Amino acid sequence: MGQSFLAKQAKTKKSRAVAEAEFLAAHFQLDPDGKLPEDEQAGNKGVKARNAQKARLYDFPRIPDGELQRLEGIIEKYGLPLSVMSSRIAAFVLRRVMADYFRLSTLRRAVRPPMFTAEELVELMRVLQVKPAQLADMVSPPKDGGRNNALGSIHRWMHGASTPTSLLAIKINRLIEQNVRHTRTGGFPGKFDGVARSTRPETVLRRERKYKERRRGKEEMVIPVSQSAKEALERKADATESETPDES
């Protein structure tokens, strides 16, 4: 077992993939899982830390046109082999490309139409009879600061400071769909509270007549009968009449 050609080839391929992943993670200065180190991740950093991290990637003088053309020519001719560059330069290029990509995603999310309006959000809290903090507890787990982040997002959406397009907004939009835009309908009718609602003359007369008959005990229960049942009763009645002897 495990000594066939395909088995040996699979083992060799897996070992090669593990070795290459470890090399690239170390070359790009990432952790063993291929993610950014703990100190470079977004997390709950303040404005100062975010600006400092952004400055390390973007604060450079403008490249002259001649140098830009030379750089583009080199990339066009030799490609961009990050694996043969020094670890410092390769790690910087990777982080700069990632920053530009995520910046584009942020801009697209900012110009995307909102999932719901501030009025719908306020109406949802009115229908559910909750406050913003209670709504944050409903849609976000309390661990890892999720409740505080959700509460901040809800306040920003209420005041129009940001656009609801995140995963949290998807959860709240689902609640708005169920409780504000498309309320539940159907089911059993509500219990009659004894108050006559209709004031149409014919309805009032019919209602009074039914009440009188009910008090006199003359009201009969009307049981609906299907057409096939009616035909069966008629055939049975005809057969009974035909079997009755003529007394004359």
Image (cartoon, rainbow, N blue to C red):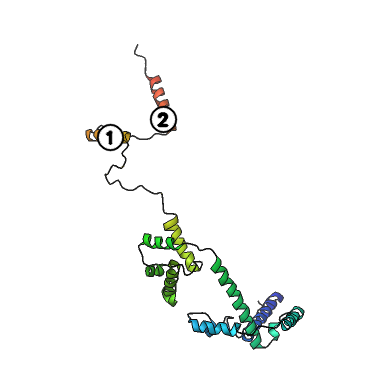
Residue bearing mark 1: 210
Q: What's the residue type where badge 1 is placed?
A: Lys
Res 120 → quadrant: bottom left
Q: Mark 1 vs mark 2: which is more N-terminal?
A: 1
Q: Is residue 218 above or below residue 106?
A: above
Q: How far from the left and from the top, in percent, is residue 244?
A: 37, 19
Q: How far from the left and from the top, in percent, is residue 101?
A: 61, 74
Q: Secondary structure at mark 1?
A: helix
Residue lying at the far top in this picture: please name it.
248
Q: Is residue 211 above or below residue 68?
A: above
Q: CA distance from mark 1 to mark 2?
A: 26 Å
Q: Nearer the viewer, residue 177 or 239?
A: 177
Q: Are marks 1 and 2 in contact (CB under 8 Å)?
A: no
Residue bearing mark 2: 230
Local packing at callout 1 (Cα closer than 10 Å; few below 14, some 14-19, many 20+) is some
Local packing at callout 2 (Cα closer than 10 Å; few below 14, some 14-19, many 20+) is few
